[in-house]
Image: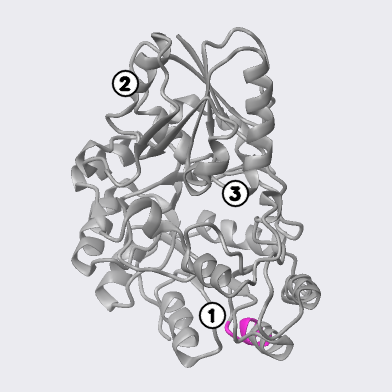
């Protein structure tokens, strides 16, 4: 069987430096495809989809809501050719009802141990319209190394610099953050991968830069320390979402090669100021992730927040507009309050105001979103700040881990 797996393109945010990371969900799913299936992977952000009759089966791996319009177009073209098209991925799960209007089949949930039946059904002409494992999580021990061999590494470089590979050490999240859909997708129970599985996958990754994509590493302090001790021998440089604010944890993270963290900056408190200072005291950089348009944000509050960001010495900042994605607490609240302005999936990319803010007009929030990007990067462009962050690890001698005096 010849199986084509497509990662659809989507419109990038206007202010972001244009580069492409290798998709993670696609290579994790591909690892669960049965032996004997010939797999061709296409990332439409860097490659063209081969619309030809040679494929026995077509899959669409859809991570982002804003990818869905393109995914539906790809699906339509292949179905007109008589091909079965199955959807999977985060956005497919979040918008299952809409996806089922387009797809031959929809796969919900984690792929490990479940795809043999899907491919057997398709080969027998008995493909089901729905395979629903959303609440039946795969045993975490069954999550092996991702199948990165389906990627073309030459597609994932920016100005000659190879981009980070994506990797995960756990699934699920015990938190229930306002804009996040992870509890719906992966459950509220933290599910760490066994350390032998973590080490196995790290040993197979030939890239010395990683993005550890777990929703938060600050789930269990003892697990974090064990994870970082496991990572130390592999000599990787990596970025991640937040890490526990603990001396031993931060020191081990730095020794394990923590390059920078994504830190949510949601106010101008001393807590946030000290959090950033603490990371930097261990030689760990910080990229602020800033959501604009929270219910306490008026124009002055956004201006104060950007002033604060310029004071606290962030290495990078990424601004988005609060977006009420499906199956998040934000969506639930705004639907109840009648504040959703549009359900146009293409606009749900974090750069468009799709709801009625409480303290500012939609048009003014949109203007303030652009103002925030332009103001923060007025003196140094995002591209230059990214270059400095990459240069910091290239020039790092000795390895990270030594704490700097505050």
In the depicted structure, whether residue 219 falls above or below residue 107? below
Q: Nearer the viewer, residue 14 or 115?
A: 115
Q: Residue at x 60, y 82 (%)?
A: 295
Could you tell me which secondary element the residue under label 3 belongs to? helix
Residues at discs 1 and 3 in contact (Cβ within 8 Å) = no
Please name which of the two marks, 1 or 2, marks the residue nearer to the observer. 2
- Give whichever of 370, 91 is nearer the camera: 91
Label 2 or label 3, whichever comes before in sequence order: 3
Kindly indicate the quadrant of the structure image that contains residue 42. Answer: top right
Q: Earlier in the sequence, mark 1 or mark 3?
A: 3
Give the total of numbered labels: 3
Q: Residues within 10 Å of mark 1 (few under 14, many from 20)?
A: some
Q: Image quadrant for the C terminus?
A: bottom left
Q: CA distance from mark 2 to mark 3?
A: 27 Å
Q: Residue at x 54, y 61 (%)?
A: 392
Q: Which stretch appears magenta? A: 307-312
Numbered mark located on residue 396 in the image: none
Q: Residue at x 70, y 62 (%)?
A: 351
**Quadrant in the rendering for residue 226:** bottom left
Horizontal and vertical percent position of residue 266: 54, 80
Instruction: Give the mark, 1 or 2, whose residue is nearer the N terminus.
Output: 2
Identify the residue under disc 1: 266
Task: Examine the residues drawn in magenta and state their main secondary structure.
Answer: helix
Residue on which the image places disc 2: 116
The residue drawn where x is 47% and y is 58% is 327
Q: Position of residue 132 (x, y in %)?
A: 36, 37
| Residue bearing the label numbered 3 | 65
Badge 1 marks a residue whose secondary structure is loop
Q: Position of residue 6 (x, y in %)?
A: 57, 28
């Amino acid at each position: 069987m010849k199986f084509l797996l497509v990662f659809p393109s989507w419109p990038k945010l206007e202010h972001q430096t244009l580069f492409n990371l290798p998709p993670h969900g696609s290579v994790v799913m591909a690892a669960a495809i049965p032996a004997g299936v010939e797999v061709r992977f296409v990332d439409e952000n860097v490659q063209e989809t081969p619309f030809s009759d040679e494929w026995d089966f077509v899959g669409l791996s859809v991570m982002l809501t804003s990818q869905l319009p393109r995914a539906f177009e790809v699906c339509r073209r292949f179905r007109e050719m008589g091909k079965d098209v199955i959807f999977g991925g985060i956005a497919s799960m979040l918008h299952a009802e809409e996806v089922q209007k387009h797809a031959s089949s929809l796969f919900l949930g984690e792929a490990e141990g479940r795809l043999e039946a899907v491919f057997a059904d398709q080969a027998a002409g008995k493909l089901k319209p729905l395979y629903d494992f959303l609440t039946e999580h795969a045993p975490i021990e069954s999550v092996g190394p991702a199948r990165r061999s389906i990627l073309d590494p030459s597609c994932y470089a920016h100005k000659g610099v190879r981009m980070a590979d994506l990797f995960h050490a756990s699934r699920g999240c015990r938190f229930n953050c306002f804009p996040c859909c992870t509890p719906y997708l992966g459950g509220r129970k933290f599910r760490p991968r066994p350390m032998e599985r973590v080490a196995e996958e790290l040993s197979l990754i030939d890239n010395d830069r990683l993005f550890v994509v777990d929703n938060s590493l600050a789930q269990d302090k003892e697990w974090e320390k064990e994870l970082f001790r496991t990572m130390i021998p592999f000599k990787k440089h990596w970025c991640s979402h937040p890490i526990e604010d603990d001396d031993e944890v931060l020191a081990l993270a730095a020794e394990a090669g923590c390059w920078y963290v994504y830190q949510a900056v949601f106010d101008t408190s001393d807590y946030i100021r000290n959090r950033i200072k603490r990371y930097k005291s261990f030689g760990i950089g910080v990229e602020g992730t800033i959501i604009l348009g929270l219910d306490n944000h008026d124009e002055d509050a956004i201006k104060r927040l950007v002033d604060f960001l310029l004071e606290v010495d962030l290495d990078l900042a990424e601004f988005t507009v609060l977006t009420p994605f499906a199956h998040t607490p934000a969506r639930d609240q705004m639907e109840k309050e009648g504040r959703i302005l549009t359900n146009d999936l293409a606009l749900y990319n974090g750069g468009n105001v799709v709801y009625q803010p409480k303290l500012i007009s939609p048009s003014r929030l949109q203007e303030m979103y652009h103002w925030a990007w332009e103001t923060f990067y007025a003196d140094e462009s995002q591209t230059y700040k990214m270059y400095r962050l990459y240069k910091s690890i290239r020039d790092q001698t000795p390895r990270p881990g030594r704490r700097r005096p505050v």
